[in-house]
Amino acid sequence: MKAHRSLGMFVAIAWLSLSGCKSGSVSGAEPGNSGGSETTTSASPSQGGSGSPILTMPASTSSNTPSSTTPHDAAVVECTDGGDCVCPTLSVAVVGKPGVWGDSSDTAFQNWLNSSSAGTAKVDNYLDKPAFTPDFLAKYNVIILASLGDNSANGPWWTFSPSEMTAFQDWIENQGGGVISLSGYSSDSNEINAKNALLAFSGIAYQQQNISPPCLIEDAQNNKLCYRCGNPYQIVEWNRTDPVVANLSRGVTMIGMDGGHPIDAPSDAHVAATTTNASGVNNWLVGKVVGKGHVLFFADEWIAYTNQWAGQSTQNDPSCKGYSPQDLYQTAQFWYNMIRWTQPTANCFTIVDDSRPVTIW
């Protein structure tokens, strides 16, 4: 059903080094381990509490290049572990046009990160292609590659020069940058070309085919619920035994997706999510440690859409009670896991959200 998909959001998420950060509310378990302490956050940001980050947020001073979904220009989050405990803010840049195929908009991720991270993260939006220069990349520590084109449905698709690709690779391998790549924005498979080119050095690549996993959820009358109650198709097969990627599925049972690109994984990569059908196994989430950095490919973009977080289109339909995306999917937890995995030293990154409690690890 991905003939109606988008090419829109190019997301760049950044983290200034947090190696000196300490926080009483967030454990420092290494993302490569499936064990470690964890905390489920549910307190309101205004409540504070023991070990919670303390944020003083100045007025927004965003430049005329990125636009901002909410004011977010706090540079430092102080911790409660003493005067020497500071947490540089996780800076996120969303680069590109919004996707259009999910119900409502695809800004839910940005809004959630801005409003629910208790000042430990922020988001900038770049609606036009930035130049991937060393100076630009140095502002960010995680880059989420979403839809890379002038139009979210049909391009034209962006290209990156050899010098930009070299700078991008250096930023990952030598500067410790983290990348989360999304796909499936358009029925035109050319939308994946820029991502495959930028990350060719990792050996991971999107396939040309655009497909969906099986529809697995049913209501009490055994009716399939894909494309009812705001539901796309589902990913439910997680690799929880590989210590490198086990935390990517921590607290996650099911994620919605629709019409994404399966992923080719080299032998030194780590497959974190798959689905199996009559034609074989498709990889939907693949990670790899490359030098000092982390590269993560996800097959789809549906997790960015508002209806995967709050189910606005179905919230007044009583027949959808218990079957809406917010009831079935752990979208916020999945986003937290991906960000945390790409920056394993980000011990201060936290989420405080009553409506979508997230397990912090």
Image: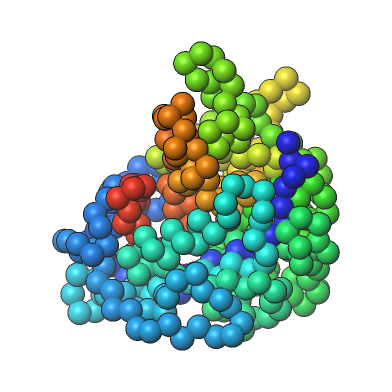
**Image vertical order of residue 130 relative to residue 280, above or below:** below
Percent across and percent down for residue 214 are 65, 26
Q: Residue at x 43, y 82 (%)?
A: 60
Q: Left or right: 353 with respect to 202? A: left
* Residue toward you, 24 or 96: 96
Quadrant for residue 223, please give it: top right
**Image vertical order of residue 257 relative to residue 350, above or below:** above
Does any portion of residue 331 appear in the rendered image? no
Q: Left or right: 108 with respect to 87? A: right
Q: Residue at x 42, y 65 (%)?
A: 114
* Residue toward you, 49 or 271: 49
* Residue toward you, 332 or 206: 332
Q: How is the image coloured?
A: rainbow
Residue at the extreme left? 50
Residue at the extreme top? 221
Q: Residue at x 81, y 61 (%)?
A: 155
**Image vertical order of residue 316 relative to residue 129, above or below:** above
Percent across and percent down for residue 217 are 54, 24
Percent across and percent down for residue 343 are 47, 61
Q: Left or right: 278 with respect to 250? A: right
Does any portion of residue 210 appear in the rendered image? yes
Percent across and percent down for residue 213 are 66, 31
Q: How many marks?
A: 0
In the picture, which quadrant includes the N terminus?
top right
